[in-house]
Structure formats: structure tokens, C-alpha cells
Image: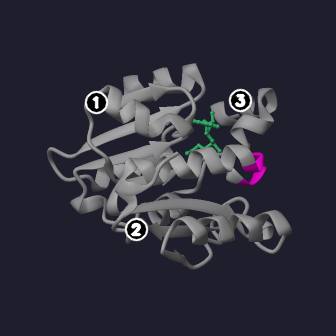
Amino acid sequence: MSTLFWKFLKHPRQVGACCPSSPALCREITSHIGVEKASLVAELGPGTGVITAEIYRKLRNGAKLAAVELDEHLADDIEARFSDITVFRGCASQLDTMLNSCDLPPADVVISGLPFAIFPEELQDKILNGVVRSLIPGGTFATFAYLQGCILPAGIRFRKKLESLFPEVTTSPVVWNNMPPAFVYRCRNSISAGERKS
Ligand SMILES: C[S@@+](CC[C@H](N)C(=O)[O-])C[C@H]1O[C@@H](n2cnc3c(N)ncnc32)[C@H](O)[C@@H]1O
């Protein structure tokens, strides 16, 4: 059984999935958002690192990767496994403060593996507003959603939330080769995003 499965049994409302994203979903969520050209990519909720590994594979030489993970043990594993990664332990809603605290600039790209669908609205808002503040103007944000959730009221509300925060929101084709099938939201930050406040 995978590490994530046991973590899910212990903290279902934090982990949100009993198995890691499939290789196909990891490829999709890291595509068409400019990872290859980025100077700094930030990942939210890396878990066991399946998306982290794909980001790493695509990053150019000299680019930086920062990750925010709530689970201390998973954060330790990520830090030990990936060289030159900056790992923050805590809530993803603090991303902008965390980057600042290490003199890191705003990110070109933020990629989320967080289980947004099971988060209360207040936490969704805090995290998404933090993402907006952490991105360069025109930067990109990618997050996935499970297919079955997108027709439910909460899924529709989440899409509207993204559309209210980002001037451009597109979706990927469905990744059927994932358990359960999922798709990716790709969002572009406003070019005047630096003016937003928390
Ligand atoms: C479903 S797992 C995703 C793991 C991996 N990214 C993937 O796609 O397979 C979600 C991860 O987000 C972390 N997490 C949950 N809430 C968080 C929060 N508020 N801030 C940072 N990480 C959080 C969990 O501890 C868990 O490791």
C-alpha cells in the first residue's frame, strides 16, 4: 500500500485521495503553463512527489522549485529526495509570505496537487488569494479536479471562483487514465495582479 493511502486513512480531510496522481495526470498538469521557461515554480501539496518529479524533469538549469506541504513527514521526504528544492512546512495559503521569508521572488508558475474539492470555501479562498499574490503578473496557476465533481454545485462554485480571480481560465482534456478521471484547470494571472491585497 502506498504512503498516501495510509495518510488518507489517518487524515482524509487533509489528504483527499488514497492514491497519487497518475503519470498521465502529472504530465497534463505540468504542460502548457510555461514550466520549461520558468525561473521559479511553486508546488502546493506535493504529497509523495509524483508531480514534483515531473516538474523537476521539465525545469531548465538554474530554475528554482519551492513546495508547501502541511504534513511534516511528507515534507521531510520531499526535501531529502529532491536536491535544491525549498520546502515550506505549513498551509499553502501562506505561500506569498513563505516565498518572501526566503527572499524568493513571486513565482512564474504555481501548480497545486491540493484536494480543493473537500476544502471548506473559506480555505479555498485563502489559498487561491495567496496564489494570486504569489504569482508574477501574467503568471500561471494549474490545479486538477475530479470529473465527477465538476457537475456538482461545489464544483461549479469552484470554477466560478477561479474565473473571478483569473482573467483567463481553460480546461485540459479529461485524463481518463487517472483514478478517478480528472482534468486540469489552467489559469493566467492578471497583468495587474501585483496590486491585489489579501
Ligand atoms: C492528494 S495529496 C496530493 C499528492 C500529490 N500532489 C499527487 O497529486 O498525487 C494532497 C497533499 O496536499 C497536502 N495538503 C493538504 N492541505 C494542505 C494545505 N492547506 N497546505 C499544504 N499542503 C496541504 C496533503 O498533506 C497531501 O500531501
In the rendered image, the quadrant that contains the N terminus is top right
Quadrant containing ligand 1 reads: top right
Q: Quadrant of residue 156?
A: bottom right
Residue where numbered disc 2 is placed? 190
Q: Position of residue 85 (x, y in %)?
A: 32, 32
Whether residues under marks 1 and 3 lie with C-beta atoms below 8 angstroms apart, the answer is: no
Residue where numbered disc 3 is placed? 7
Which residues, given as a range, are shown in magenta? 117-121
Mark pair 2, 3: CA separation: 36 Å
Q: Amino acid at mark 1?
A: Ser
Query: Residue 33 versus residue 18: which sits nearer the camera?
Result: 33
- Disc 3 within 8 angstroms of ligand 1 (CB): yes
Q: Secondary structure at mark 1?
A: loop
Q: Position of residue 190 (x, y in %)?
A: 40, 68
Residue where numbered disc 1 is placed? 83
Q: Secondary structure at mark 3?
A: helix
Q: Secondary structure at mark 2?
A: loop
Q: Residue at x 55, y 39 (%)?
A: 93
Mark 2 and mark 1 lie on one chain; the one further toward the N terminus is 1
